[in-house]
């Protein structure tokens, strides 16, 4: 393990990043240490660390607003394989691979079983983590993710991985192949995104971290180009696996059989702030009938991004963490 970034203060926490050994290399992990005394429960025992797992094209820097609202708690959040500063890690990708990567980070950095919170695809990863490594998870919170996502109308069950990616993510996948002339140009790209009606420091630092330097595709000596850090190959593989993979199916069957306690928070608006969200209310109700331990609730006034980056989503996530 090595500390590779300078400490940055958030008010409630200090921040470092660590590299954790995983298959094929190292996983970049953000760690926030509380500046206040450790939070304790009613019995006086220190509350467990919180592990935050981001979505399919995101990074660990999606979480500072949630961290800030968890004074006294140690918080750990990885860049998943193929994302952020873990983008050089090779495949295979998929929910089982990500779950094992997160397990390595929890074992090294959490100091015991943790409360695990997964957003979007991070919810799938977190559910599979709980199935594969139940000793590492004290409580599971799924934030607008983790349950199978209904395919949009017109997408056949036998759709190719590329068709699945475009059906589920739309413009979110298109930006991954774009080059940007400057960091400010990338900020302007995101300022126009309909999900972010308010541009905040939380959004800005997330966007700035997302842009990475890559060698020019034509092999020229003109210097590096700026592109989003997420690997398109990782997104394609993970989209297919989350829709059809054995790891998720097995985890869902296990959760149904055992009555695994799961908190599910639904955003009523989607990736583009459109009404209806990623999960229609009826889909969530159907899964609540299949999973006896699932406790689902809707967080009014948020979309798929702001449920973890702004109020009232942050408050709902923190309440679910306990």
Image (cartoon, helix red, strand yellow):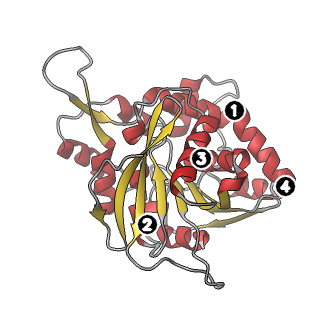
How crowded pointer 2 is (Cα within 10 Å; few <14, some 14-19, many 20+) is rated as: many
Are the two marked residues, 3 and 4, in contact with CB atoms closer than 8 angstroms? no
Residue 103 - label: 3
Of the two numbered discs 1 and 3 on the same chain, state the one appearing first in sequence.
Answer: 3
Q: CA distance from mark 3 to mark 4?
A: 21 Å
Are the two marked residues, 1 and 4, in contact with CB atoms closer than 8 angstroms? no
Q: Which residue is mark 4?
A: 258
Are the two marked residues, 1 and 3, in contact with CB atoms closer than 8 angstroms? no
Of the two numbered discs 3 and 2 on the same chain, state the one appearing first in sequence.
Answer: 2
Residue 199 in sight from this viewpoint:
no
Q: Which residue is mark 2?
A: 67
Are the two marked residues, 3 and 2, in contact with CB atoms closer than 8 angstroms? no
Q: Position of residue 132 (x, y in %)?
A: 71, 44
**Is the residue 126 above or below the residue 242 in the image?**
below
Q: Nearer the viewer, mark 3 or mark 4?
A: 3
Q: Residue at x 48, y 57 (%)?
A: 76
- How many marks the image carries: the answer is 4
Q: Position of residue 10 (x, y in %)?
A: 32, 68
Q: Nearer the viewer, mark 2 or mark 1?
A: 2
Q: Position of residue 283 (x, y in %)?
A: 71, 52
Residue 245 - label: 1
Of the two numbered discs 3 and 4 on the same chain, state the one appearing first in sequence.
Answer: 3
Q: Nearer the viewer, mark 1 or mark 3?
A: 3
Q: Looking at this view, is 53 or 21 the one in front?
A: 21
Q: Quadrant of residue 260?
A: bottom right
- Secondary structure of the residue carrying tag 1 is loop
Q: CA distance from mark 3 to mark 2?
A: 20 Å
Q: Quadrant of residue 253?
A: top right
Q: CA distance from mark 1 to mark 4?
A: 20 Å
- Secondary structure of the residue carrying tag 3 is helix
């Amino acid at each position: 393990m090595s500390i590779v970034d300078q400490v940055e203060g958030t008010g409630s926490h200090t921040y470092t990043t660590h590299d954790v050994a995983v298959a094929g290399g190292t996983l970049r992990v953000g760690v926030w240490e509380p500046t206040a005394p450790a939070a304790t429960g009613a019995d006086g025992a220190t509350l467990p660390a919180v592990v935050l797992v981001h979505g399919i094209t995101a990074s660990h820097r999606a979480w500072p607003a949630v961290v800030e609202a968890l004074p006294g708690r140690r918080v750990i959040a990885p860049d998943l394989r193929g994302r952020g500063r873990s983008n050089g890690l090779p495949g295979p990708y998929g929910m089982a691979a990500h779950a094992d990567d997160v397990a390595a980070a929890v074992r090294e950095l959490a100091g015991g079983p943790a409360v695990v919170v997964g957003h979007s695809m991070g919810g799938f990863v977190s559910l599979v983590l709980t199935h594969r490594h139940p000793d590492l998870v004290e409580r599971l919170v799924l934030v607008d993710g983790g349950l199978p996502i209904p395919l949009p109308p017109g997408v056949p069950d036998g759709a190719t991985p590329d068709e699945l990616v475009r059906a589920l993510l739309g413009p979110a996948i298109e930006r991954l192949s774009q080059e940007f002339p400057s960091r400010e140009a990338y900020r302007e790209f995101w300022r126009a995104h309909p999900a972010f009606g308010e541009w905040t420091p939380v959004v800005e630092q997330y966007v700035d971290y997302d842009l990475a330097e890559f060698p020019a595709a034509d092999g020229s000596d003109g210097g590096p180009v700026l592109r989003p850090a997420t690997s398109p190959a990782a997104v394609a593989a993970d989209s297919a696996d989350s829709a059809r993979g054995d790891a998720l199916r097995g985890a869902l069957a296990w959760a149904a059989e055992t009555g695994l306690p799961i908190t599910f928070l639904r955003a009523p608006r989607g990736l583009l702030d459109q009404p209806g969200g990623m999960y229609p209310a009826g889909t969530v109700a159907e899964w609540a009938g299949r999973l006896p331990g699932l406790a689902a609730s809707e967080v009014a006034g948020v979309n798929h991004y702001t449920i973890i980056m702004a109020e009232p989503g942050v408050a709902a996530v923190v309440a679910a963490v306990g």
